[in-house]
Image (cartoon, grey):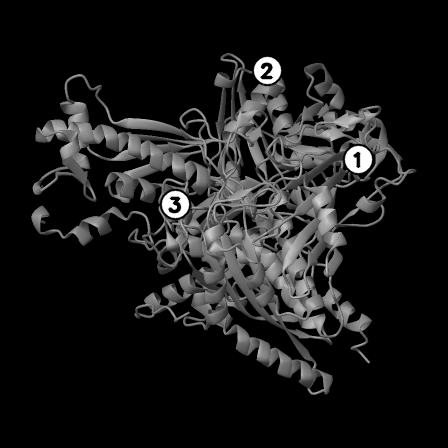
């Protein structure tokens, strides 16, 4: 329990190659936040329930609070900091969350956005029910989810070349 | 663009002022992962603190041995009560007038109580060290049931109070009694009951729960020994109060303490108080000379920093046979846990529980509250409500339903019959409040029409008959609620915290080019103040909201304010910002008069500037006036254009609303499906309808959670059950119902812009709406009151007890 040996880890984060030595027990979320200063992903529960730490790893949504950094060796990781388009414009989801008031305190937002990104890559035009099921691993304490659903619908419409039409209440 | 062709409507629209669904300023950084929350802040040499916590709910501490931990490389210090004693910091005063152990002083009184604070080079080593610290306990008998706390033979839970027969709020009746608080005319109320045609009496309990914002409580303390200055970053809903408390406790002069509340990941009342983690981080930074960060984990958050509710309300209503209420009598047994660290204004040990007469014209009422100690976590915060207002609303709204059932009246009709009428405002309630304004009948009727209330009742009747015939296993409930809140604490005549009156403040500074920075005593935790405060200024001063920056949370730059909780931001700070803007406008008018070479009385305000009456072509915009304020002020007038306002509200505000919940319960599974939830809110003037709707959605989701399962439970040994998100119910997008929102507008007559506050209404009104729906569903089978929370297991149990499972 005293001096713990570190081991090398090499991965791609937001398109950039990263190499570091880490303790084997270092959680990926701490590696991202403290080693790489990518503080977008947050820690809300440490037990993989809240999803505030969600990042994308090789195309899958992963809760980075319950994965070791060394398990991401060789992987490609995208965090919210890497979500915007290459030309610097905001991703349709980022735009949608603002337009549809899909966030309040902003703490769950980075995880929610990264989850929604993978959801839309797997199901480009989800129904409300599919969205609600698809984001059930991410908790939000502020919004009641209704506007998050709309934000994701907004982004889906935009990514599909349509203009989002809000359903009548 | 030619300025001349811009229409008045366009000029108005580009301000994005009050009433506009302005998109949020905050979202730009939050959606890009660029918010700055406490745990995002790193300082050079920063250490991490973590607590050794009690495994027992009640025990003497015989020995603490930290030697193995101190020998671990990377461990810098271990602080116990012994280390804090010479500093006088092993106990701290609470907001409620009690004292609380910062670190256990020879005894633990609730599970997970703080025993020692480990400071290490990183959080992993701190956690390792905690495992190495040995604590030897001597177990003591435990009280978790507040109804046993004042038994004659109950163990003494607070030996430090031995012999003290008087507490901060008057006489103590028992060694585990904290206070008794009474209000109202007892003999007149007793008379009303003695002469009543109909009475009801029920124990209505509001279980213990927790605000559980997604970001836990955390801080980063950095003490500069050379300058003798402390910088304290933290998740503070009330940064100035924290600065004052830190100064009083640490003896560091207040001007040498810099409190900074950066972005906050939700508060809901959890982040109002001062916690052991803050004190220990400050001490650790002073001792080590290095910055020390403390970040609570989720289990610590749910089990230590401030629960909510735990109110057990014996409620009686007296009425006539035709349903006119004649009296209300309530006794509350309030479980405050091991220390009374309830976050209330100083003179209000039971908060504003005396709003318990609700929306109804009770001629007489009496309320008594007894606070007791138990071996549970201390706290008693207002979880998204003004102080004890959600308890009061739940109490009266359940009781009105119980009365309706006894009278055989429709619960909506009973409410209509007893509402305070529009012409009675301002209304003096039997328990001492002056309700500022309302039109309850209008709101209720609008809500009933919108949801198709009579049709729903007809459907319910048909379903009940079908259920009795065995054609369905579903029962239908319609939850009716009409709540009145009391928010915006508060007038200095009756509200203070540690002696500081509960005003709030705003400072507005217009720059020469006509853009603005405004600094506030409030502190957003997600409410969107950076967006909405700018909208108020935009309307008041005619400067586009996009040209206005709002800054909160830095006590060095912001004027002193009491912070954001109890829906007080809009009623108090929102008023301050309007008043500060009006001071600026008065000066601007003098400058405009000078520029236009007319008397200031010849000018009138028009959207974004002053124009000469009868000569609308002669105009000076606020932007032009701003330049002149720095360039060519009128002779004798000091240059510059800025103002500060400290607003002491003349009264509270009284938002209200009508909520309806329609649910279908499967009696074989206990699962309740929310078919519809309709929420009509009246928060007076609406600053940003988009944000209001968002607040209502969020508050309703919290209400849904609380009513339908969210609970902090203890076993008989005082072990906290389910202090993680595995067990503590936070609804996901799947369970969360769809919300329908609506509104009426009854402006507050005493508020400068007529706004009342809305953020907490949905929690206050939502909980009784859900609970009334469950009770309404079962009522035809003979139940009168089913205790919350209504999770599927408990609902199934109700069905089983009623013999519905064959």
Displayed quadrant of residue B607: top left
Identity of the residue drawn at 30% across and 68% down: A163
Residue behind mark 3: B754
Residue underneath mark 1: B177
Do marks 1 and 2 both belong to one polypeptide chain?
A: yes
- Which numbered circle lies on residue B251? 2
- The disc, 2 or 3, on the residue closer to the chain's N-terminal end is 2
Look at the image and tell me in which quarter the C terminus of chain B lies.
bottom right
Where residue A64 appears, as percent x and y from the top left, is 56, 51
What residue appears at the point 64 percent right and 32 percent down from the top-left corner?
A: B275
Observer-nearest residue: B223 or A33? B223
Q: How crowded is mark 2: few (under 14 residues within 10 Å), some or many (20 or more)?
A: few
Distance of label 1 from label 3 (alpha carbons)? 42 Å
Question: Dot 2: what SS?
Answer: loop
Q: Which residue is rendered at x = 62% and y = 50% of the image?
A: B363
Q: Is mark 3 on a helix, strand or loop?
A: loop
Across and down, in percent, residue B441 comes to 49, 61
Eye-nearest disc, 1 or 2: 1
Q: Mark 2 lies on which chain?
A: B
| Residue B322 percent location from the top left of the image | 65, 66
Question: Which of label 1 and label 3 is nearer to you?
Answer: 3
């Amino acid at each position: 329990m005293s001096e713990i040996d570190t081991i090398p880890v090499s991965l791609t984060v937001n398109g950039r190659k990263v190499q570091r030595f880490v303790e084997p027990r270092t959680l990926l979320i701490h590696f991202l936040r403290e080693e790489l200063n990518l503080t977008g992903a947050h820690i809300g529960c440490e037990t993989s329930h809240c999803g505030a730490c969600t990042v994308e790893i090789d195309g899958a949504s992963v809760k980075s609070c319950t994965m070791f950094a060394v398990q991401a060796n060789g992987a490609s990781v995208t965090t919210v900091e890497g979500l915007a388009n290459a030309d610097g414009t905001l991703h349709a989801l980022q735009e949608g969350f603002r337009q549809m008031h899909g966030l309040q305190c902003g703490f769950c937002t980075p995880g929610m956005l990264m989850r929604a990104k993978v959801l839309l890559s797997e199901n480009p035009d989800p129904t409300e029910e599919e969205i609600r099921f698809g984001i059930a691993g991410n908790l939000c304490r502020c919004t009641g989810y209704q506007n998050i659903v709309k934000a994701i619908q907004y982004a889906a419409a935009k990514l599909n070349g349509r203009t989002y039409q809000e359903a009548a209440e | 663009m030619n300025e001349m062709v811009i229409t008045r409507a366009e000029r108005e629209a580009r301000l994005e002022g009050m009433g506009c669904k302005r998109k949020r300023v905050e979202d730009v950084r939050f959606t890009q992962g660029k918010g700055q929350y406490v745990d995002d802040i790193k300082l050079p040499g920063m250490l991490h603190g973590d607590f050794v916590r009690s495994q027992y709910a009640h025990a003497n501490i015989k020995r603490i041995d930290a030697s193995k931990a101190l020998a671990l490389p990377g461990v810098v210090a271990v602080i116990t009560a012994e280390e804090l004693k010479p500093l006088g910091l092993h106990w701290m005063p609470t907001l409620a007038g009690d004292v609380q152990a910062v670190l256990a002083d020879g005894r633990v009184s609730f599970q997970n109580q703080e025993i020692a604070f480990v400071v290490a080079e990183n959080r992993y080593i701190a956690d390792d060290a905690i495992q190495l610290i040995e604590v030897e306990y001597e177990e003591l008998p435990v009280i978790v049931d507040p109804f046993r706390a004042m038994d004659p033979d109950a163990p003494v839970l607070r030996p430090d109070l031995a012999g003290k027969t008087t507490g901060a709020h008057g006489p103590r009746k028992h060694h585990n009694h904290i206070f008794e608080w009474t209000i109202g005319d007892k003999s007149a109320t007793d008379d009303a009951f003695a002469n009543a045609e109909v009475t009801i009496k029920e124990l209505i309990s509001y279980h213990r729960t927790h605000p559980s914002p997604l970001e836990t409580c955390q801080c980063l303390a950095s003490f500069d020994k050379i300058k003798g200055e402390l910088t304290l970053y933290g998740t503070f809903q009330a940064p100035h109060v924290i600065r004052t408390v830190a100064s009083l406790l640490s003896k560091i002069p207040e001007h040498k303490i810099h409190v900074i509340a950066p972005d906050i990941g939700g508060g809901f009342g959890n982040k109002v108080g001062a916690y052991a983690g803050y004190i220990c981080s400050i001490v650790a930074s002073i001792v080590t000379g290095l910055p020390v960060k403390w970040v609570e984990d989720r289990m610590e958050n749910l089990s230590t920093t401030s629960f909510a509710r735990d109110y057990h309300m014996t409620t009686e209503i007296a009425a006539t046979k035709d349903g006119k209420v004649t009296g209300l009598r309530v006794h509350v047994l309030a479980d405050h846990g091991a220390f009374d660290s309830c976050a209330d204004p100083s003179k209000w040990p039971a908060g504003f529980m005396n709003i318990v007469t609700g929306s109804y014209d009770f001629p007489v009422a009496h309320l008594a509250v007894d606070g007791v100690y138990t071996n549970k976590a201390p706290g008693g915060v207002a979880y998204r409500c003004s102080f004890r207002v959600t308890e009061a609303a739940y109490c009266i709204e359940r009781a009105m339903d119980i009365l309706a059932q006894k009278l055989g009246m429709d619960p909506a009709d009973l409410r209509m019959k007893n509402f305070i009428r529009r012409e009675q405002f301002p209304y003096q309630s039997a328990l001492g409040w002056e309700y500022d304004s309302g039109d309850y009948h209008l709101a209720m009727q609008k809500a009933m029409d919108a949801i198709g209330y009579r049709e729903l009742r007809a459907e319910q009747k048909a379903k009940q008959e079908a259920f009795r015939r065995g054609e369905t296993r579903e029962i239908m409930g319609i939850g009716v609620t009409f709540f009145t809140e009391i928010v915006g604490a508060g007038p200095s005549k009756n509200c203070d915290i540690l002696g500081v009156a509960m005003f709030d403040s705003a400072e507005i500074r217009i720059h020469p080019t006509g853009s603005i920075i405004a600094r506030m005593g409030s502190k957003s935790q997600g409410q969107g103040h950076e967006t909405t405060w700018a909208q108020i200024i935009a309307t008041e001063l005619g400067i586009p909201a996009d040209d206005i920056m709002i800054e909160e949370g830095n006590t060095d730059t912001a004027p002193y304010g009491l912070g954001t909780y109890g829906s007080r931001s809009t009623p108090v700070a929102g008023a301050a910002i309007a008043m500060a803007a009006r001071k600026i406008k008065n000066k601007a008018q003098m400058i405009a008069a000078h520029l236009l070479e007319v008397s200031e009385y010849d000018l009138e305000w028009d959207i974004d500037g002053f124009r000469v009456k009868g000569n609308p072509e002669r105009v000076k915009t606020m932007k032009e006036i701003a330049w002149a304020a720095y360039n060519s002020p009128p002779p004798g007038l000091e240059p510059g254009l800025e103002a500060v306002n400290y607003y002491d509200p003349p009264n509270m505000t009284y938002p209200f609303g009508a909520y309806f919940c329609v649910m279908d319960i499967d009696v074989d599974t206990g699962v309740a499906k929310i078919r519809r939830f309709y929420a009509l809110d009246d928060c007076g003037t609406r600053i940003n309808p988009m944000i209001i709707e968002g607040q209502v959605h969020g508050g309703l989701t919290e209400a849904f959670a609380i009513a339908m399962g969210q609970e902090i439970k203890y076993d008989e040994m005082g072990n906290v059950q389910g202090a993680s998100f595995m067990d503590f119910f936070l609804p996901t997008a799947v369970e969360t119902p769809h919300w329908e929102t609506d509104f009426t507008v009854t402006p507050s007559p005493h508020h400068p812009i007529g706004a009342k506050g809305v953020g907490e209404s949905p929690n206050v009104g939502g909980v009784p709406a859900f609970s009334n729906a469950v009770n309404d569903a079962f009522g035809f089978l003979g139940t009168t009151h089913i205790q919350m929370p209504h999770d599927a297991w408990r609902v199934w149990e109700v069905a089983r007890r009623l013999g519905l499972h064959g």
